[in-house]
Image (spheres, grey):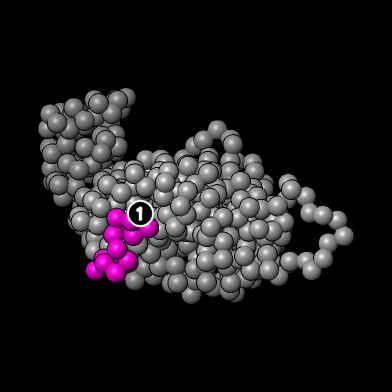
Amino acid sequence: MNKILMATAISKMFLSEQMKSSLGEDGAVEPLVEMFKSGNHEAKHSVLAALRNLSSSLQNAEILINCGITGSLLQLLCSVTSVLMTLREPAAAILSNIAESDRILLHRDAAPQMLSLLNLSCPVIQLHLLRALNSICGHTNAKRARAKIRQNGGVQLLLPFLREKNVGIKVAALNLMFHLSKDASQELAEQIRETHLDILVKIIASPTPGIAEKAAAVGVLSNLPVSDKNITKFLTQANLLPVLISLLEANISASPSPQKMWLLEGIASVLTRFTVPWDKKLQSLAVGHGVLPWLVKLLSEGSVKAKSKSATSLAQLSQNSVALRKAKSPRWLCVPPSAESYCIVHDYQCTIKSTFCLVKAGAVNPLVKILEGEEREADGAVLEALATLVQDEIWENGSRAIEKASGVHALLRVAEAGELTSQDKAIWILERIFRLEEHREQYGGIAQALLIDLAQKGDPVLKPMIGRILAHLQLLQTQSSYF
């Protein structure tokens, strides 16, 4: 009885995170778990209440998992004994807390068991289970856990929750769909129907849902394969594009929050669907709705993931700038073209709407600025965008535009410290820049030591292109074995 009274006292205390951790360090968790496993109904009830209070500490969550409580809690949730029914809600709440520790992944059957309980539980327990599953699937090393949930019909089981009236449950279900489809976009596309897409679009377009619900719905759409033309056609006809741009406009400069950041990342990701290079008509529609200036703004104000996706869209649009210049080139002009609209890179009267020009959109400087930053996640997408400015027909003028934006130093930085694919693309762009005498004279001195070091110590795949640059700098003969 004294133990029950002590457990009840702990359950009713207001404890800071530090106090919870201290209790765990002092050995309070283990005897409570033992009481739960061997005690009577009254003991179990008081212990669960105490552990619910203590388990929100990540340190205590790990102690609980190590004590083997996960299986006992799941067993309790599976019980249909009436006397134990009152214990199910606190047990589910503790599972939700301890799932925030990635040690839960050691219990490989935990997630499928929680999934199987979803439709057999009351709304309060459903919400705890969905939160637990979200935590499990959100861990960085949870790929196998996500696959197991999908194999057990996770996506199909979650789709009915799109019509759920309880907003908390609906958002949690959408979040879980987002996590499950991270590495299985095609599988999601095969299971999702137009009725589901319609619900998602209505959530995003309606003024009623909050940021969390909209962000979750956009997140699910962002994981659908961009190559699926039927999905693109449906979303285009549903007028999703102007809705996304309005959401961008309303949230990009608003006070930041994790939910707004996730919303902007999702929007930036979905917009890559509407800027695919193989559909100029769709690109024109997106640009006509004013997408380009917002993509450029995201380069400066978004998270690194939003910046990366925005750069991908800009790269896709810019891939067609040269072709659009040719298609729109007039044979004669009644009025001389204005100097303001003339583009030095494309040697044409560019506008954002006519040629999707990165120079006229003011994208070059913010793209280079990302390469100058500390975060490397967006480098690949940014380099793809800059590479469109040095295509074969325009490389000379494009090289000057990148140099003018202080791009040479930024490219050298990526060549030195970026990931291999980014290094390779940065060196490819640098080779074109160093074809010009003016750039060799200005930057050759600072580039040669880095390039020689990279050629000697870097990945062998970089060696041939580095050799070309060194040849431009007259540090290597063109017939060298570097090529």
Give, as a single range, the part of the protein colored magenta: 469-483
* Main SS category, magenta section: loop
Residue nearest the observer in this picture, 97 or 385: 385
Say if the magenta span includes residue 103: no
14 is higher (above) or lower (below) than 202: above
Residue 300 lies left or right of residue 138; in this view the side is right
Q: Is residue 101 left or right of residue 408?
A: left
Question: Viewer-proximal residue, 92 or 414?
Answer: 414
* 357 shown above or below 252: below
Residue 299 in the image: x percent, y percent? 52, 45
Seen as rendered, the residue at the extreme right is 334
Within-10-Å neighbours for mark 1: few <14, some 14–19, many 20+:
many
Residue at the image position 39 percent from the left and 70 percent from the top = 153
Residue depicted at 60% across the width and 41% down the height: 251
The residue under the point 25% across, 26% down is: 18
Q: Is residue 54 above or below residue 430?
A: above
Q: Which residue is mark 1?
A: 473
Foreground pick, 292 / 55: 292
Amino acid bearing label 1: Leu
Q: Is 13 displayed left or right of 271 in the figure?
A: left
Q: Where does residue 394 sit, x and y in percent of width and height?
A: 56, 61
